[in-house]
Amino acid sequence: MNPRERRGVSLERALSKLGLASRAEARRLIAAGRVAVNGRVVVDPLAPVVPARARISIDGAEPANPSRLVVALHKPRGVVTTRSDPEGRPTVYSLIEDLGTHVVPVGRLDLATSGLLLLTNDTRFADWLTDPRSGVPRVYLVTARGRVTDEDVERLTSGVESRGEPLAASAVTLRKASSRESHVVVTLTEGRNREVRRLFEAIGHEVTRLRRVQIGGLELGALTPRAWRVVDEAELNRAFPGYGRRRRD
């Protein structure tokens, strides 16, 4: 259990972390008096609970913990990584069918970025994947405007500053460079907000196309844009052995 879970989280977040409801759905259930913690109805969505220790019931029944489900989606450009969008843009949830359990995106891909996105009902797994201390590599194919030089590659790996924040890629491979555009493979392990675009902005190159092709040992492969598949446990254990060891400890 991580320190945040020991201190407790809000009840609405606990329902989301347990894969029982989205945050918005949880607020509605709680406000309607349908949620109880350790036998007592709680109507405050922000009431603190420790999910691993609390008995949470909905309509008098304690939901069974669902089996872990992980979905690999090829998110296309122009789709937002959120459940709903006030501007009416398509969301990643519009691309997947009803899975019988609530799933959350593992991190985000911005509107203009395509590629591999994972969604899961196992929020502990999601937290581990996105925690920089886990060091899970994420690999991106980058098309950048102009010629990226060997000196630029050195700057990307040694570190740059972006808006007062130090950034660095774990690995960079220059595949092609011309005066018009360059193709670069970038590996990150921290996953900060818009990190790839900010790295290239810091060395004076605009990213014109960005696609994530790998997370840990899990590759996008032949999955076509808008397509998705369920990742089975054997593949997850091979792709993320560090999490398997953590679960056994």
Image (cartoon, helix red, strand yellow):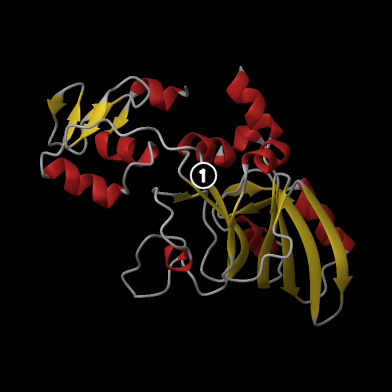
Nearer-the-camera pick, 170 or 25: 25
Q: Amino acid at mark 1?
A: Leu
Residue in view at x 17 percent, y 32 percent: 60
51 shown above or below 141: above
User: From this viewpoint, which residue is outermost toward the top?
Assistant: 249
Q: Residue at x 63, y 46 (%)?
A: 166
Per the image, the residue denoted by label 1 is 69
Residue 54 on image: x %, y %: 29, 22
Q: Depth check: 215 or 131 in front?
A: 215
Q: Position of residue 140 (x, y in %)?
A: 71, 59
Q: Residues within 10 Å of mark 1 (few under 14, many from 20)?
A: some
Q: Quadrant of residue 136?
A: top right
Q: How many marks?
A: 1
* Horizontal and vertical percent position of residue 170: 76, 46
Q: Secondary structure at mark 1?
A: loop
Q: Quadrant of residue 249?
A: top right
- Vertically, is 80 above or below 179? above
Residue nearest the viewer, comparing 61 with 112: 61
